[in-house]
Image (tube, rainbow, N blue to C red):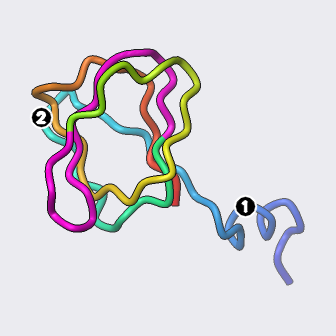
């Protein structure tokens, strides 16, 4: 039997991945349900369709309900980005 706290975390339908652009572009490996922007700025992403889109002027705390497979280092000035699944 699983620990109840662990079951709530591991069986959750929602998961988050921190976007790190320190080493270049960030590939998720699967499409996000939405993208969270913690610090205002612009974000360049690759949509699930393969299209590259520049999202300008994203405010602090913005939650974008978009299917994204990558965040590009070039063209991204926003910070504390999370991919939500």
Residue at left offset 79%, top offset 70%: 7
**Residue 3 is a magenta residue:** no
Q: Nearer the viewer, residue 7 or 46?
A: 46
Residue that mark 2 sits on:
24
Q: Position of residue 45 (x, y in %)?
A: 23, 44
Magenta span has 48? yes
Q: Is residue 81 left or right of residue 71?
A: right
* Viewer-nearest residue: 23 or 60: 60
Q: Is residue 25 above or below residue 61?
A: below
- Please state the extent of the stretch shown in magenta in the rendering: 36-53
> Is residue 1 placed above or below 59 in the rendered structure?
below
Numbered circle sitting on residue 9: 1
Q: Earlier in the sequence, mark 1 or mark 2?
A: 1
What residue is at 42 percent from the left and 24 percent from the top? 58
Mark 1 falls on what kind of element? helix
Residue under the image location 53 percent in, 18 percent down: 60
**Disc 1, disc 2: CB below 8 Å?**
no
Tell me the CA gap for discs 1 and 2.
29 Å
Q: Please give left or right for residue 13 compared with residue 84 in the image.
A: right
Q: Residue at x 43, y 15 (%)?
A: 40
Which of the 4 image quadrants contains residue 12? bottom right
Q: Quadrant of residue 47?
A: bottom left
Q: Position of residue 31 (x, y in %)?
A: 36, 65
Tell me the tag on residue 19: none
Image coordinates of residue 10 in percent, x first then y, are 67, 67
């Amino acid at each position: 039997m699983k620990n109840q706290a662990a079951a709530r975390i591991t069986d959750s339908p929602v998961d988050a991945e921190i976007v790190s652009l320190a080493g270049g572009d960030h590939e998720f490996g699967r499409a996000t349900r939405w993208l969270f922007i913690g610090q205002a700025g612009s974000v360049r992403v690759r949509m699930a369709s393969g299209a590259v889109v520049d999202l300008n002027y994203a405010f602090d705390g913005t939650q974008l309900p978009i299917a994204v497979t990558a965040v590009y280092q070039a063209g991204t000035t926003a910070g504390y980005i999370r991919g939500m699944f």
